Image (cartoon, helix red, strand yellow):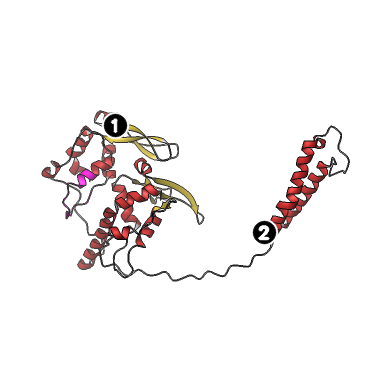
Amino acid sequence: MPAEIKILERAEMYLRSLSSGVNPLTEESLPEGDVCRQERISKCLAYVADYLKLKVMPAMERSEKKVAPKPAKVLKPRPVRESATNELVLTPETLSKFEVSEEPISLSGFVRRLNFLVPQGSGMIPLVYADVAEVLSREGVLLKEENEKGKDLNLPTPHGEELGFARVEADIRGHHSVYTKCNVDAQKFILNNIDKCVAQANERLAKRKERAESGESGRSGKEKFHVTDDQLKNYPTDESPVPVSEIARRLNDLLPQDSNVEKIYFKTIRDWFVSQNYLEEKKNALGKIFFVPTESGAQNGIVTQSRVGKNGENYDAVLYNGAAQKLVLDHVNELA
């Protein structure tokens, strides 16, 4: 800082000499035709010299003065949540206390704020990031992508961007991170689907209890997704093109509430279309993956519609009409 002040002092002296029509290096008068001797230029140089002396340098000198160090922050021990034995319940009254953040927040930050609503001592299982990410993936809002280190990232799909979820890149504690942030609309979308997130958490608790009772340490698996012919009759087919997430939702709705069958994810259906050469995976200039129908896919009912995302960018949404949905139904038990 002292070196910078000396440079400013010298600059102020040079400017003042030039404003007076004098060469600051030789102290000789400048020629009559020199630009610094023009009245408007001279006044500007004098003004800048005064500004440096009266405003900039005093401010730098004040900042140089030592500031009394802040008292060391006392770190409070992090409260340990009791071992969860009860199902999570978030009543409308409880959820009414949640304050939506006007500033976009990370998905994990949103989950933490929700967990503050769980009463201490209740023994209820808290939500975890994976519970919410799982539900958003089923709804076609998030899609898993691998980063350069092979780590799975839950990042928004074009549909997710429409709902207010945004991909963010930032350097956090010296590490480059890519994650999802949620604006007001996105936070409200999660709250509107909070029952599904709670069910996911309670299912996790049930599996944990099941493993504990049986003495197993591994996962207690469910049956792979499958439906009967009678169940398929209840699938609401129509000719209106729908996203693949809607196909997955309709298929999952065919399962009984107490079913021991795993639900199907939209990614499973989409990957099947890719394997059958109905969809083709591509990357844009930023390396982001997207899918487009092949010629065979277009002939079998896969269409695209131009849409505008939250950031104002145009993109093509891939949709599936009645013919494409019938393809799924004909091979539904082969997908998982």
Does the image show residue 186?
yes
Quadrant of res 267 = top left
Q: Is residue 172 magenta?
A: no
Residue found at the very far left of the displayed protein: 230
Indicate the amino acid at tag 2.
Ser
Q: Nearer the viewer, residue 307 or 272?
A: 307
For label 1, the residue is 303
Q: Taking 262 as reference, is 310 left or right?
A: right
Q: Who is closer to the viewer here, 269 or 205? A: 205
Q: Is residue 323 left or right of 110 when viewed as pictured?
A: left
For residue 137, the mark is: none
Q: Main secondary structure of the magenta part?
A: loop
Residue shown at 88%/41% (left/top)? 28
Q: Residue 42, relative to residue 262: is it above or below? A: above
Position of residue 187 in the picture relative to residue 17 (left or right) = left
Kindly report which numbered mark, 2 or 1, lies closer to the viewer in this rendering: 2
Measure the alpha-carbon separation of dots 2 and 1: 62 Å
Q: Amino acid at mark 1?
A: Val
From the image, tell me which residue sits under label 2.
Answer: 63
Where residue 114 sits in the image (x, y, percent)? 35, 59
- SS for tag 1? strand
Taking the spot 26% from the left edge, 34% from the top edge, the residue there is: 241
Q: Position of residue 19 (x, y in %)?
A: 81, 42
Residue range highlighted in magenta: 249-263
Look at 25% across and 28% down and name the residue there: 299
Q: Position of residue 65 (x, y in %)?
A: 69, 62
Residue sticking out furthest to the right: 28
| Dot 2: element | helix
